[in-house]
Amino acid sequence: EEFCRKLPKVELHAHLNTSFSMTFLNELLRKSGNLNGVSLEDLHLAEAKPLAEGFAIFSKLHQVFRTEETIYQLTHSVIREFAEDNVKYLELRSTPKHIPETGLTRDIYMQTMVRAVQDCQKEGVDITVRLLVSIDRRQGVEVAKIAVDLAERWMKSTQGLVIGMDFSGDPKVGDASDYIPVFLDAARRGLKLSLHLAEIPLYKETKKVLQACCGHCVLRIGHGTFLHRYESNQGHEEIEDLVVQWKIPIEACVTSNILSKTVNGPGSHHFWYWHRKQHPVILCTDGKGVFGCLLSDEYYRVAKEFSLGREDLVSMALSTFDSIFESDDLKQRLRDILRSFCEKEQ
Ligand code: 5GP
């Protein structure tokens, strides 16, 4: 457990609003007296519940984090907490909110996140952070286009601190393939894409998106629970073939998937399928607050379940560096950090 905590790691799938810590929420509650009518217990999944219950929690969180100040504090504390867990590189994603009652605009939301990242940098927090702008599929294609414009503008004005887009939100709402032109447009503007795909068995939209985007976008897949060949998806083998052919990294959120009941247990998680195939797969938290897991917990859980030793964990961490949306120089820096960690551990 201690080894997993000390291991230098990258976190590539973390939603800002679901990544709070209980310490942070308690502090917020102490300072402001209440959490806009939401109770602490309502904000995390203590036991496995259907995916819809998770989305009910996300809405409550959006009632809590509604002002520039709380978004700043949340971003700042989430970054610090990942750094304390020895995450050396973090891609943090969030849906920019427009909340007229509190004066929050999507632009102020971006500015606030960026300011928190830059302040952490100035304060010497030992982590490199990049931001992804989320598209919420419940909000429709027009809002998605606004998000792409916003991301491009902030990518340019921050010299690449904003680095790409995330596509998420309730997979039961809308059709991901409606967003294909938006994805291609974002990629043309130089934005990298992490798309929630096949989180539930939606073979048609998954296939269409992959067929359209592979080869045109720098791409990773969030969750990807139903991409691989298994007994129920016969006739959809093309999905796995595309993922393999284009070597698309998969962000595997083990605890989140188990608590959201899209996967039965750690032993049946698709992480192992891809890992055994030596396909790029990265352990991620998804929302360390809602799902109550640190990234080191995810490594420990997998190590225990699949009897992985220290060397396995080191090579697993090493392999994740190739999937970051950043330059070869930064990948090399991460490898150097890991090498000196291993030397110290010997
Ligand atoms: P935010 O974008 O507000 O910082 O983070 C919360 C949002 O991320 C949710 O409202 C939802 O759109 C998205 N999200 C967080 N976790 C998940 C997940 O497990 N699956 C999907 N599809 N979307 C998620």
Image (cartoon, grey):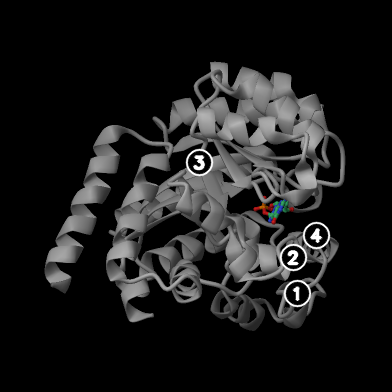
**Residue beneath disc 4:** 55
**Residue beneath disc 1:** 48
Which mark is first along the chain, 3 or 2? 3
Tell me, yes or no, whether the two marked residues, 3 and 4, touch with CB atoms within 8 Å. no
**How far apart are the two marked residues, 4 and 1, measured between alpha carbons?**
13 Å
**Residue beneath disc 2:** 260
Q: Amino acid at mark 1?
A: Ala
Up the image or down, 178 lies above or below 166; here it is: above
Q: Amino acid at mark 2?
A: Ser
- Residue 249, numbered label: 3
Which mark is first along the chain, 1 or 2? 1
Which mark is first along the chain, 3 or 1? 1
**How far apart are the two marked residues, 2 and 3, measured between alpha carbons?**
22 Å
Q: Secondary structure at mark 2?
A: loop
Tell me, yes or no, whether the two marked residues, 2 and 4, touch with CB atoms within 8 Å. no
Within-10-Å neighbours for mark 1: few <14, some 14–19, many 20+: some
